[in-house]
Image (tube, rainbow, N blue to C red):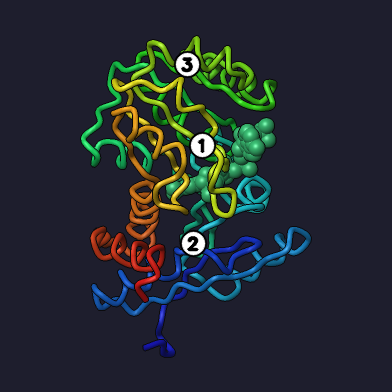
Amino acid sequence: MVGGATTVVGVIGNPIEHSLSPRMHNAAFEYLGLDYVYIPLRVLEKDLKNAVRGAKAFNFRGFNVTIPHKVSILRFLDKVESTARKIGAVNTVVNEDGKLSGYNTDGLGALEALREAGVDPEGKKILVIGAGGASRAITFYLAGVCSELAILNRTRSKAVKLASDLKSAGFKAYGNGLTVEALERELVDTDILINTTSVGMHPDVDRSPVPEELLHRDLVVFDIVYNPLETMLLRYARKVGAKPVDGVGMLVNQGAISFKMWTGCEAPRDVMRKAVMDSLLGRD
Ligand SMILES: NC(=O)c1ccc[n+]([C@@H]2O[C@H](COP(=O)([O-])OP(=O)(O)OC[C@H]3O[C@@H](n4cnc5c(N)ncnc54)[C@H](OP(=O)(O)O)[C@@H]3O)[C@@H](O)[C@H]2O)c1
């Protein structure tokens, strides 16, 4: 139960009411008997600076950051970890003796989710659809392990910019516009396809960023969208005999990494996964 000595963490964003993170983290605190609470905080863009000051003044242990603040928060933090700075987005803030440090746990969370699913990206060709915040986080982690990385995005210039930022960081990557021709060309020899766009996310559940006929059975298809659990893209993947990987693993793992930063404890990932699944499947 929340008391005078309870340590406070949370998530800032807008909208925030659909976030699964409060359930996931509070279930983990309860399971480990930690005197922590995780609260959702709706923060408008114009109020971000004051919200960050407030988190410091209230002595929050830290907080997650979600849409639309992942990029704009960087300028209000005392320190930003070097990969998060290259990514250009922060999803986790830790209060270290009154100084706020920013990290990005999305990329490592995605890499761990692939490995948990039995997929080793080492030496593989990866095709990433999308060049937004999640794509930037994921590509900065995967570029170091895969053999070839292609990025296709609806707005071509963003894919080209991301590839160029990756190259500046010493990685090899290629960016282009998201067209059927480019998909066809890249998918032929791709091992792992990753959707980082919001296409297929609730309520837009009848759409896929890649047509079924371009998929093949030697692919791993990782969709980071987790609502619905089986997106149209993952349904297509299953139909053609490819290996589908859903977005829940990434959600749980990025959360588990943040959890350890705040508490110093290994996160109970199974408990967190169950809390997420209960929510998604309406089992609460
Ligand atoms: N599983 C997890 O833990 C996890 C973590 C983070 C995010 N996510 C999910 O990942 C998705 C993206 O998040 P984000 O933070 O990266 O968002 P973001 O920064 O706003 O990027 C959105 C991306 O989706 C593309 N896009 C949007 N609508 C499209 C359409 N109709 N056709 C083609 N491309 C379209 C955008 O292309 P343009 O550049 O052309 O606009 C951009 O590349 C969301 O669904 C989010 O819920 C999951």
205 and 167: which one is in front?
205
Q: Is mark 1 within 8 Å of ligand 1?
A: yes
Number of other residues with Cα within 10 Å of mark 1, as a class: few under 14, some 14 to 19, many 20 or more: many
Q: Secondary structure at mark 1?
A: loop
Q: Position of residue 54 (x, y in %)?
A: 64, 71
Instruction: Indicate the quadrant where residue 41 lies.
Output: bottom right
Compared with 268, 195 (above or below) is above
Q: Which residue is mark 3?
A: 170
At mark 2, the secondary structure is: strand
In which of the image's four quarters is ligand 1 placed?
A: top right
Q: Quadrant of the C terminus?
A: bottom left
Q: Is residue 187 left or right of residue 260?
A: right
Q: Which disc, if any, is residue 18?
A: none
Residue found 64% across the figure and 51% down from its top:
73
- First of labels 1, 2 by sequence position: 2
Q: Which residue type does callout 1 highlight?
A: Thr
Horizontal and vertical percent for residue 1? 36, 88
Circles 1 and 2, Cβ within 8 Å, touching? The answer is no
* Residue under pointer 1: 196
Which residue corresponds to mark 2?
Answer: 95
Q: Residue at x 36, y 60 (%)?
A: 259
Residue at 35%, 72% in the rendered image? 283
Mark closer to the observer (3, 2): 3
Of the numbered discs 3 and 2, the one sitting upstream in the chain is: 2
Farthest right residue in view? 46
Is residue 177 shown left or right of residue 102? right
CA–CA distance between discs 1 and 3?
Answer: 22 Å
Q: Residues within 10 Å of mark 3 (few under 14, many from 20)?
A: few
Compare residues 21 and 199 and report the one nearer the observer. Answer: 199
